[in-house]
Every structure is written in C-alpha cells, then in structure tokens.
Amino acid sequence: MKRQMAVFAFVFVIAVFAFGQGEAAGMPAGRPKDQRRPMASPSGAVSAQEQSSTDPNQVVVLRCGALLDVASGVMRRDIQVVVQGNKIQAVGAAAANAQGTNTVDLSNATCLPGLIDTHTHLLLQGDITAEDYDQQLLKESTAYRAIRAVVAARKALNYGFTTLRDVETEGAGYSDVDLKTAINRGIVPGPRLQVATRALDVTGAYPLQGYNWQIDVPHGVQFCDSAEECRKAVREQTGHGADWIKVYSDRSYYVEGGVLKDVPTFTMDELKAIVDETHRERKKIASHAIALYGVHNSVEAGVDSIEHGDYIAPEDLQMMRAKGIWFVPTLFVGEYVAQGRAQAGAPVWVKMVEIAGDTFKRAMQAGVKIAFGTDAGGFDWNINPAKEFAVRVKLGQSPAAAIRSATLDAATLMGMERQVGSIEAGKLADIVAVPGDPLSDISVLEKVSFVMKDGVVVRSNK
C-alpha cells in the first residue's frame, strides 16, 4: 500500500509540472541555438519529459572560459567541451574544430563536473529538534512526503548536484527507490541516485520515542535484533532495491575527558553479520557513527564509509586508512542544528561542532579518504547544500581538495568514477558552471548558473 501511495504521489506531481506549478530556481537564460534541444523554461529549468528526450546524435559545444581539472586541481583556460548525446566526446584542443549545431557560451564562467553529495535525505525536510522530525512522521503521509521529495530532488539538481547518495527515507519505506525509478524514466527531474532505503537500528534506539506504549507509532528505521534477523533485513532491503545498506551504530552522545562518547547500538556479532551479508550481496554499507564506540565498532566490522564521525580516535583513523574506509563528515549541518538542539535540552551538540572540526583536521592529516556529504534534509532543502564547501575550507581543506571530494572522490566512493566525477571524454555529460573562480572563492559554488545532466541542459541563466 505504501508503494502504491508513493506511485500516486508521483502521478500527481506529473500533473503539477504539466500545469507549470513545479518549483525551480534560476532566471531566463541563454540557450543552445537549435530549438530541437530541450531548453530552459522561464524559471531556468526544463521539464521532466524534455529531460528524457536527448537525441543520441545531437552535438553540443560548451565554450568554457575556464575548466577545472579536478584530478590535478589545475585550472585550464578557454576550453571547449563537445557533448554528443549524453556523453562527453572531446575536451580542449581536440574540440576546437568540432562542428556542433548547438553552442553554449560559458566564456565568462568556470566549468566543473556535476557536483555529488554522498549524504542526503530527500524524504526529510529538516529536523533540528525531535518535534520537527516527529511532525513529519506523524502528520505527513508517505504520498505527501514523496511529493515533497520530488521538489527536493529538483532543487538539488538546480543547485548543481547531478548525483546523490541518499542514505535512508526516515520512515518513508522504499519511496527512495520509487523516486530513483521516476527520475531514471524521465517522469520527474532530479539527480541520478543511489539509495539506502530504510536503514537499520536495534529495537528501542531510534525515533519515534516517548509516546504512549499502547499506540503503535511509526519509526524512522527498520529494527533488527540478532545476527540472523539482521541478515534477513539486509536481504529484504536489497531485494526492494537498496543500492547501499545503512546502519545506525551509536546514539546518546556525551563528552567525557574531552572525548565524544556514545552508547553503541548493535553488538559486534550483529554488526559483523550485517557487513558480511551486505558484501555477500555485492552491496556497500554506510555507518552512521558519530562518536568513539560507534566509529570503532564500525571500523572493526569493516564498513565502507563512516558517516558524520564527529569524533574518531587516532588509532581508528589509522585503521580507516589501512582498510580504505571512506570518511563522510557533515560539518555544516552540525553548526546548523547545534543551538536549536541545545535549547531543546541537548547542549552537547554545541560542543560537538568544535570536536567535529578537530576530527576533520586530524582525518586530513592522517590521509583518510574523504568524500563530500552534507546531510541535506537534516536541514531545509531551501538551503543550498554547497554551503558545506566553505566550512571545509575554513577548517583547512584546500578549495581544490574540497571540490575533488564532491566530484571525483565522491564518484569513487559510489563506484561511479568511470561514469561521472570529472570532465573527460567518454564520461556522462554532467557539467556545471559557476560565475567566478572557485579556487579563489569557494562560495561561488553556491551560485551555480548552468547545469547539464546526461547531456541535457536543465538550468542555464547568465
């Protein structure tokens, strides 16, 4: 029934877009000359049906004033990118004599690969406090939340994020699989997705909590207890379309002796069983692990990525590097929710901001692989997730490294480095442009003016 309601939501949204009511960002724009190509609407974005109509023989030439080679961090000047169908055909000098029928003038902008956010929640619309979260699960139907997720996906695409790893639906079942399918079929616009569906936690450890025990309230995750029960949950989620499995490895944070500590959730037998079953299914596993014990247990169990990681012990950083485990810090959201959660009775969140910043610096020094993630959905989707870049640079990451973390490195974490993450011949034509030099001013990534996904211009305003 929930899946039927989610499908109904998408049908409803199609009608909304058909009558021009869909939300989008941007202003009237310059466009390729051939009107057969999908063009930006007066709002700066094209419709979902237009997005799916790419002509495989259509050639578009992008004239970039500058282009960032994310692998080397080198800025190249006066570069042309030739796109045929949905792929990049040539870059640079090889494109100089290309006879494309469509030309996009980006000579006053810097071109980059489409941005990638590896930690989002499209089915969530902000949860500074428990009340914010509870309202969504108690008062919004799955269908209504799916409609809001479609709008969030369109916003993400207009911000310049052409690929997302969405790490659970927070009580909305497998709606992320439906959203992914709708985007892939061109029914609604949005980034390409990898999804983690429901996520896993132990009984009694995840909201909703504190309600009358006689009432069966919804919960934000799928509970599992015992190794065998958790293996079955992994199988269920992968069977319903999960690209990733996500576990919540800790909760209840507190500072003791300057170290952020926690209450671990799964036993090591349970956690190792989840990791083993996930890898046996040829999937990857992300662990929400904010503090000492959750991180340590996750690293010992062999997860593929540590999410948040506000505190990571030095020895665990070394083990992460040795095992090749990725670190996905979410720094902006920590600052964003800290005061609200402190006022709601959890002052530890204020302390966690400084602790997380220190951990980020130590992770860079330790040589741990770091990918870009924001926890968008943990803050309102009206806020541009690209604000995360400025926080990272303020803490000492170079602009080039920060951008690489959201392009080539993020693509590598997701196993998509051969398809996206850099502007190279043969890769999918996911390209964005910004009005300035992000190596000298990282904040220009919050002002994306051009977005191409799969060879189709979905936003263009100059």
Image (cartoon, helix red, strand yellow):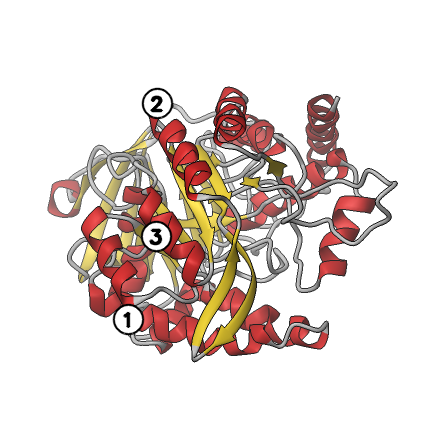
Q: Which residue is mark 3?
A: 105
Residue 285 appears in the figure: yes
- Give left or right: position of 285 versus 20: left
Q: CA distance from mark 3 to mark 1?
A: 42 Å
Amino acid under label 2?
Answer: Pro
Amino acid under label 3?
Answer: Asp
Mark nearer the viewer, 3 or 1: 1
Quadrant hosting residue 102: top left
- Give left or right: position of 200 versus 204: left
Q: Residues within 10 Å of mark 1 (few under 14, many from 20)?
A: some
Judged from the image, the secondary structure of the residue bearing numbered disc 2 is loop
Q: Is residue 365 above or below residue 126?
A: below
Mark nearer the viewer, 2 or 1: 1
Q: Residues within 10 Å of mark 2 (few under 14, many from 20)?
A: few
Q: Which residue is mark 1?
A: 362
- Give left or right: position of 423 versus 135: left
Residue 66 x/y as whole percent: 25, 60
Foreground residue, 255 or 90?
255
Quadrant hosting residue 140: top right
> Residue at the spot x=46%, y=29% of the render?
36
Q: Are marks 3 and 1 in contact (CB under 8 Å)?
A: no
Q: Residues within 10 Å of mark 3 (few under 14, many from 20)?
A: some
- First-in-chain label (2 vs 1): 2
